[in-house]
Every structure is written in structure tokens, then in C-alpha cells.
Image (cartoon, rainbow, N blue to C red):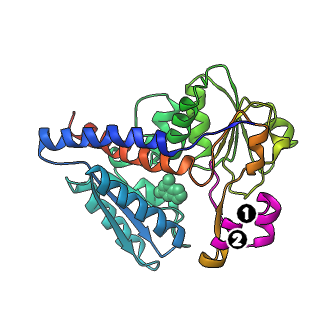
Amino acid sequence: MGTWLEGKPVADKIRDQVKNEVALCQQTFGKVPGLVGILVGDNPASQSYLRMKEKACQSLGLYGQVLYLAANTARDQLKAKIEDLNNEDKVDGILVQLPLPKGFAAHEVISWINPEKDVDGIHPYSLGLLLQNLPGLRACTPLGVLELIKSAGVGIEGKDVVVIGRSLIVGKPLAAMITNENGTVTICHSKTKNLAQVAARADILIAAMGKPGFIGPEFVKEGALVIDVGSNAVSDKAVVRELFGDDPKREKEIQDKGFTWAGDVQPRVIDKAGWLTPSPGGVGPLTIAMLMRNTLEAFKGRHHF
Ligand code: GUN
């Protein structure tokens, strides 16, 4: 039986450090780091993520604001909005919540952000710095995953690390960051052959493909560190029962909210793994903490602090 690796205690430490440094910014410069999130359309999961980010800003003393734009906002209007924020001194971080509604090309929209303010770390310039292992803003969820691995006391150097999922915001930057830390990375995806066997070679297994309960014990080496990045809204009670067993709390959630959050990893994996992050409650709190730290870092970069 492994150990549950909870995100909150790790996130709380980072949040405390950020809070102290934000207070120092106020003392030194008479202003605090600022973050603006942009939501185009009304995706309910995106709304909930942005509310959490805004609340985090408030509790750590950063300036935080969410801009709500209609799904039918014109391309040029969104571009002009981002350019205004690029030129706004009190804004250090700009984040466009993904996914964008149909008709927008995410890569184009992200490219409009000034890389100095790219707190999501997904502008081509930020990704270029990452591949060159040069200092720069890094994607928040991969940064959070690295913090969780560190908190388990597991070193990355020389380890076999398998990342399942190749998204631009998690899988690909995470693989590059682990390479920079001298881990040996395999990236798997929907076309990978013998996925379970490949995954079961990993000392550190990271599930980030967005398929609820896909990872069972057959994917996991005895004693491995397993990080579950998956955060899926599941509304089918039968599916939940099959993947997670009888769980009255989840069933009540489906009754009340219409869905329950589920990770990519089955909770029963805890019996085989050395460590497993819960989902929700594992990676999620770290993503937000790292966004706050990135906004502070962007402020420091812009103020040569
Ligand atoms: N959608 C899901 N996760 C993220 C994230 O970390 N950043 C942005 N911009 N959109 C997301």
C-alpha cells in the first residue's frame, strides 16, 4: 500500500512564499504583481478554474482580474484587448483560458501575448527557452508536477519517467522539463503500442491524457511514483462505479451537480504504487500556486527585481 501524495500542503508552502514576496514588492515598488485571465465564451469548467485563480490572487495579495468576452467576439477585438494588456503597466501576467471556442486558433491567440507576460509558459518564445534549458516562464501544471515529485523525496536524475499525453500545456513541456532535470523520458499517446507494458517500466509515471480511470494497476510498476494530472467531469454513474467502486460521495455529487471529477488513474492503483496523487486534490492546487509564482516572477523580470 502506497502513500497518497496530497497537493495542498505542498501548494500552501509555495503560496506562503509568494505571499511574502508580494508584500515585499508592495514595500519596494508601491505596487503588486497583477494577473489578468481572459475567458472567451462560457465553458463551465473554464469559469470554475478562472474563479479559483482570481480567488488565489486575492488571498496572496496580487492584483487579479478576469475579462469575460462573448464566444462571438471578433478576432481583431480579442487581439486589440491582448495588446492593451501587453501595454498596461499594472498587468504582469496574461492568461487566455483554453480551450477557446470554435473559430479561434489557440496558437495564434497565444502568440499575441508579450512573452514577458506569458505566465502560462506556452508562447512559442517561452517554449523555445524551455527547449534550450534557458531561464524563462514555464507552464504551470508541469512545474507543479515537478514540485510534487520533489515533495515525495524522489530525485529525477537517471530515473525512467513515462508521460502519457502530449498536449502543449502539459505532456510536451513536462517531457522537456524532465529531460532538463536529467530524467530519461518516454512520451506515450493514443498511437503508442503496448502502452501498459511501456508504462509499467516507469519509476515515475505521469498520466495526463484526459481519460477517466484509464490507468489501472497493470500500468504500474510496484513502488512507482504515480502522478495523476487528469481532471475529468464524469456524469455516468455506471462508469464511476466500474472505475472507482461503490462511492456514495461521488454518486451524490452526480445527483446534485450532474457530474463528479475523476482522474486518469484508478484509486485502487494506491495498492501497488509507492505514491499516488489524488484527483482532485493532487496536481490542481499546485497548478494554481505555480501560476501565482509565475506572475510574481513576471513582475520581478519586468522590474529587474
Ligand atoms: N485549460 C486547462 N488548463 C489550463 C491552463 O493551465 N492554462 C490555460 N490557459 N488554460 C487551461
Q: Give the secondary structure at mark 1.
A: loop
Crowd class of label 2 (few under 14; some 14 to 19; many from 20; radius 10 Å): some
Q: Is residue 99 above or below residue 147?
A: below
* Rendered location of residue 170, percent (x, y): 58, 46
Q: Give the secondary structure at mark 2.
A: helix
Which residue is at 44% across, 41% downward?
126
Residue position marked by numbered label 2 in the rendering: 251
5 sits to left or right of 118: right
Alpha-carbon span between mark 1 and mark 2 = 6 Å
The one of 64 and 129 positioned closer to us in this rendering: 64
Q: Quadrant of the C terminus?
A: top left
Q: Is residue 284 above or below residue 156?
A: below
Determine if residue 7 is in view: yes
Q: Quadrant of the N terminus?
A: top right
The one of 190 and 244 positioned closer to us in this rendering: 244
Q: Is residue 244 above or below residue 193?
A: below
Residue position marked by numbered label 1 in the rendering: 247
Does the magenta run of residues contain 196? no
Determine if residue 169 is in view: no
Residue 22: quarter of image = top left
- Would the CB of label 2 be found within 8 Å of ligand 1? no
> Which region of the structure is painted magenta?
229-253
Q: Is residue 213 above or below residue 104?
A: above
241 sits to left or right of 125: right
Total labels: the figure holds 2
299 sits to left or right of 253: left
Query: As shown in the figure, which amino acid type bears the numbered disc 1?
Result: Asp
Mark 1–mark 2 CB contact (< 8 Å): yes
* Rendered location of residue 211, percent (x, y): 73, 57
* Rendered location of residue 304, percent (x, y): 21, 34
